Amino acid sequence: MSLESGEAISAEALFDFCYKRGLGWVSSRLPHRSGLENDGFENPNDPILANESNLVHHFIDPLAHHNRVWTPQDRNGFVVAPFDLKKNPALWMEPAIAWTGDTIPQALIETEAWYRQAVPEKQTIEGSKTQCQSHEEFCQHVEDLIVLLKQGDAAPFEISKVVWSRALEVQKPEGLDPYAFFQKICQAYPAVHAVLCYHPSLGLWIGASPEILIERRKDCVYTMALAGTRPRPTMESDENSRPWRPKEILEQSLVVRYLQDRFRSLGLVPLTSPTQNLQSGPVEHLHTQVQASTSLSCYQMALDLHPSPAIAGEPSGRALDYLLEHEPHKRELYGGFWGYLDAEGDGRLSVNLRCLRWHPDHLVLYAGAGILADSDPEAEWQETCRKASTLLNLLKPKIVSNEPPFRS
């Protein structure tokens, strides 16, 4: 494919051109709602908000392969943070070339000529083989965790919750390309932060996150506790008639308390909303908003809040250490966070929960479940199945591993 300035081109074709050449790319679609739309707490399922249009923003970063680390001074760019920030720093992507219309930008023509000479030919990022847990293996890991959690103070280290995850490998549906799948997510789930991100050092990832790590606008910061998971109600009348189990209520309270404590440790006064149900694709969660007034930046807030008990466990530091030692796969970007920050350093960083990594010949999806002392291994397996179905329902793939994604 050759480029000519001003020539008509679709976002899909432009992404394909950049991806094949190893040029960093981000497509980002914010959800129809924000935690900071007004001074009060809004209804997350407001049908009026759901009708608002969402714009997809695209940009190209030809220098992404330099692996620029995110710093407190960075503005007007995209943060990509892995789950494990102990060994791998959050990276920063510059929107050197923005695509806002139907034609090829002149800047990309100039970049293409330079890039061919300055940068070696793109190397396909294979990475190590992802270890996918079978149903039996997952349940055994959860049973071992339950034994540890029940020991309480007698355990090698005191811990009350661990978010255990698994990876699911699937074949790519024939004829489906990454950008087309990203478009399907945008159409199917208007309430999520949808992202298509290719970074030469991290690979190609697509996510659909319902959870905000930190959102900042002027002097107000906002985060959310999103824990407890169950199937979405089949009828509107079912929504308020079903009580949540004590396990999910405790799981949610751990995250709320953590966020409140983190805010207070930073000298902030947390304003906490009533807990509601929030629907996200085929599941719903318990949802509590926490916000405060502050001059602290997203950089300070994000690094202080990550990882929360919602994606690691409680206490989060000890749970993180346990996961890094015992989970059979590397989470990479799953459980990390990403998002765009503007010229003022304001924006939204979302926890990368419902996501997949797009390999040349297969896809790897990730899903986790919060394990407490009274957890049931089979119920936790089913929870990961429901979470994985958010993206699987749009893929309808043939499963590579011998274990089916769902068990009735």
Image: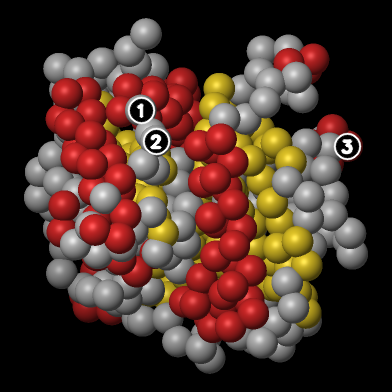
Residue at the left extreme, as displayed: 128
- What's the CA distance linking mark 3 and mark 1? 38 Å
Could you classify mark 3 by the number of other residues whose Cα lies within 10 Å: few (under 14), some (14-19), or many (20 or more)?
Answer: few
Instruction: Name the residue located 36 percent from the left edge and 81 percent from the top edge.
Output: 69
**Element marked by disc 2:** loop
**With respect to residue 405, does 81 lie above or below?**
below
Instruction: Name the residue located 36 percent from the left edge and 48 percent from the top edge.
Output: 163
Q: Which amino acid does label 2 sit on?
A: Asp
**With respect to residue 122, does 89 lie above or below?**
below
Instruction: Please state the horizontal and vertical placement of residue 284, each as a whole percent of the image.
Output: 61, 31
Quadrant assignment, res 241: top right
Whether residue 104 appears in this view of the structure is no
Apparent side of residue 213 relative to residue 383 in the rendered image (left or right): right
Q: Which mark is residue 376?
A: 1
Question: Which quadrant is the C terminus positioned in?
Answer: top left
| Labelled pair 2, 1 in contact (Cβ < 8 Å) | yes
Which residue occupies the foreground of this view, 387 or 230? 230
Say which residue label 3 marks: 48
Q: Earlier in the sequence, mark 2 or mark 3?
A: 3
Instruction: Name the residue located 71 percent from the left edge and 88 percent from the top edge.
Output: 295
Say which residue label 2 marks: 374
Instruction: Please state the horizontal and vertical placement of residue 328, each as a whole percent of the image.
Output: 14, 46
Judge depth for marks 3 and 1 and give the one in front.
Answer: 1
Q: Residue 142 carries which label?
A: none
Instruction: Please state the horizontal and vertical placement of residue 151, each as a whole percent of the image.
Output: 26, 50
